[in-house]
Amino acid sequence: MANLIAVMGESGSGKTTSLRNLDPSTTYIIDADKKGMSWRGWKSQYSTAAHNYKVEDNHETILEMLKVVDTNPSFAHIKTLVIDTINGIMVADEYHRRDEKSYDKWADLAWCVYGIIDYALTARDDLTVVFMAHAQTERDDSGVLFTHIKTSGKKLDKIVLESKFTTVLNSKCVNGSYVFETRSATSTAKAPMGLFDKATVPNDIKEVIDAINEYNGVETTEDKESE
């Protein structure tokens, strides 16, 4: 069973920038938003020539890429797969099927996203799959603001994508500092009990993955090198 992490947040909240400290030699990024990364020098780290970066928003192709990274021995060195963002996949599918009026269109849209996440859950144990997502904040009947992963169509809302993850981080800028919210009464942010001592942690996916590996008792490459 692979380790899955969802990172949600508004545009400009630091979602993509949080990837900056990942090791390019063991990371593969699928750029479904087609906007590139957001830190200085990223093109020297990630590219199609380096076989660790791909611009792609077709859900069928992305699912096949996930399967290849999971099962092909040539990609066994990849320990972190990032999909940035699932909303890019949803919008692309909705756009390509914009002339369709049937209910099946929305059912298929829900399945295309759910299917990718559902497969990721069954991937190899040493793989972490990070799903980036845009966030949506709504006001309930009591006037309370609540933030969750933004989806396209009511069917995905019924599925509740967050339910497929044990770790959901809400990327935010608080007093000028970019952080991950790990739990809150006003968002779907959550983490396994005892994983994080604080309600916010630094905006760094590598630190989050390291903390999860330690929590799960997984020996990392750094651990092996220090022996």
Image: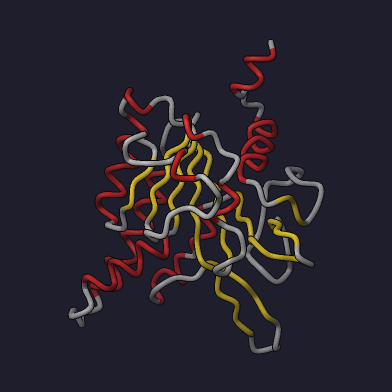
Residue positioned 63% across, 85% down in the render: 139
Quick one: quadrant of the C terminus? top right
- The answer to whether one can see residue 1 in this image is no
Q: Quadrant of residue 87?
A: bottom left
- The answer to whether one can see residue 152 in this image is yes
Residue positioned 41% across, 68% down in the render: 156
Coloring scheme used: secondary structure
Residue positioned 65% across, 75% down in the render: 146
Count of numbered circles on the image: 0
Q: Quadrant of residue 48?
A: top left
Counting from the top left corner in percent of width and height, residue 147 is at 62, 72
Relative to 112, say whether 96 is above or below.
below
Counting from the top left corner in percent of width and height, residue 36 is at 43, 55
Counting from the top left corner in percent of width and height, residue 45 is at 47, 38
Residue positioned 29% across, 56% down in the render: 59
Relative to 104, say whether 54 is above or below.
above
Relative to 215, is 5 on the left or the right?
A: left
Counting from the top left corner in percent of width and height, residue 202 is at 72, 50
